[in-house]
Image: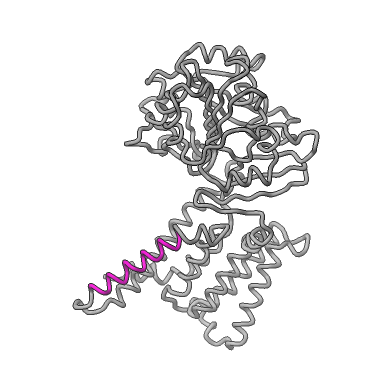
Amino acid sequence: RRAPADFVTALAPLILLIGGGFAFSEGSNTPLFSASIGLILLFSIAVALHTALYRLRPPAGRSTSFYLAMAFGGMLGGIFCAILAPTLFDWAYEHPLLLLGAALLVPQVSFVPWADRIPKALLWGLAAFALLLSFLIDAKFEGWITGGWALLGSVAVSIVALHFVGRRILFMLGLAALMMSYGGWSKLYQSASGMRERSYFGIYTVSDHADPLSRLLTNGTTLHGVQNLDPSEELEPTSYYARRSGIGHALASAPVLYGPAARIGIVGLGAGTLSCYYLPGEDWRIFEIDPVVLRIARTRFTFLPRCAPQAKIVLGDARLSLSHQPPGALDMLAVDAFSSDAIPMHLLTREALAVYARALSPQGLLLVHISNRYLDLEPVLAAAQADGWTGAIFSYQPEPFEPVHNLTASIWVAMARDPQALERLKQASGEDGYLWRPLRARRGFAGWTDDHASILPLLEDWRNWLPPSVQGR
């Protein structure tokens, strides 16, 4: 009964064109579509290739070597993606490369009846035309090649590629042209210009913007820091770390709350923005897992070198590093690791919070940044109140004129073992003190532990996963 597998196999080249064409697009504006098309693509390619393997299976007497070869191939693929690719590439180029490999391997039958009658030389000419057209589309060679015109050009490339189904090398070239039309040439340009670096922890892009004049650090599609390049605002905290944000009030109040020798810990360096809250006499320790981020913060941004060059940098997993700190070593600990699409859940479990409590002084404050496009993390911290924490949340919205200075909305949670520590923070926040409100627990949600943690109960409004045009905003 191979009919279902054969049906998926027959459609696999078409699904490769539809889904694989978006291999270079970021997908942050259409996460539901991107996730769905990615899963469909994976399923169809897996079925097609496993079906081909099934048909190529040897007699039973050679099944051991057959399965050994399959296992060895899987090992090579794992080594390539997990170990080699992060060192060879500065972007996730392994994804489009594997799709092109699939284009060479999936069984194919021509979709276009007259394609077999097209001269071979003309087909190769069409392949060259498709690659040239994809470059013109992505490079915006003319000012009018935007929006609908760019989409129309990509559709033309896909029609050309459809004629190549059944000819593996040409089909691979057609798929490559379609991929490149959706941002592939831009990715190659960014790699050639040295704008990007990659490590085992992420893909970091440093880019300069003209309006307002600024430099951005992004990890994938997530903002990790902005620096104004205007000399008068170069060292002013920006983005999630504005002076009127929750973390801004907390760090600015450190001398009032803990004296001039306050001991401050920061988890997550980013561009180093928070270091510009450093005051002479304070003891700062910054915990960062990725040496590449440290190098970027020191060489491409000036927050850390100019504001807190004497800050102690602790490289490694923050939870392990904090567990090695003496008890009560910090007065304030800011954890900024949860704004990306994939969050380090082990830093928000009950056991992790116990590590933070040990590292903080009895009147210490824990500040946690929970701004996130897809996850509502407030219930995780609210559940921790059952373990003796008291918490408050601060949602900051910039004034209409403030985004010009690269200030963005943020959500910070302050937690303490001593409720009076939170009261003192509210008082030190001045006229914004009323913006600190109690944490709201979610009924039936018990928080995360090292044994069990799931993001499914915390997914934000499902409309956030749809394109803005569908959301009606």
Residues 370 and 133: in front is: 370
Residue toward you, 85 or 345: 85
Residue 55: which quarter of the image?
bottom left
| Range covered by the magenta-colored residues | 64-81
Q: Is residue 58 above or below residue 185?
A: below
Residue at (56% x, 74% y) in the render: 173
Quadrant of the rendering where the N terminus is positioned: bottom left
Please provide percent x and percent y for residue 17.
Answer: 52, 67
Judge whether residue 305 is colored magenta: no
Residue closest to the far left: 61
Image quarter of the C terminus: top right
Q: Quadrant of residue 185?
A: bottom right
- The question of residue 70 being in magenta is answered with yes
Query: In the image, is 240 to the left or to the right of 461?
Result: right
Q: Is residue 170 left or right of residue 457?
A: right
Residue 29 seen in render: no
Residue 12: percent from left, percent from top: 44, 68
From this view, report whether residue 382 is shown above or below residue 25.
above
Q: Residue at x 60, y 40 (%)?
A: 270
x%, y% of residue 444?
35, 27
Q: How many marks?
A: 0
By secondary structure, the bulk of the magenta-drawn segment is best described as helix
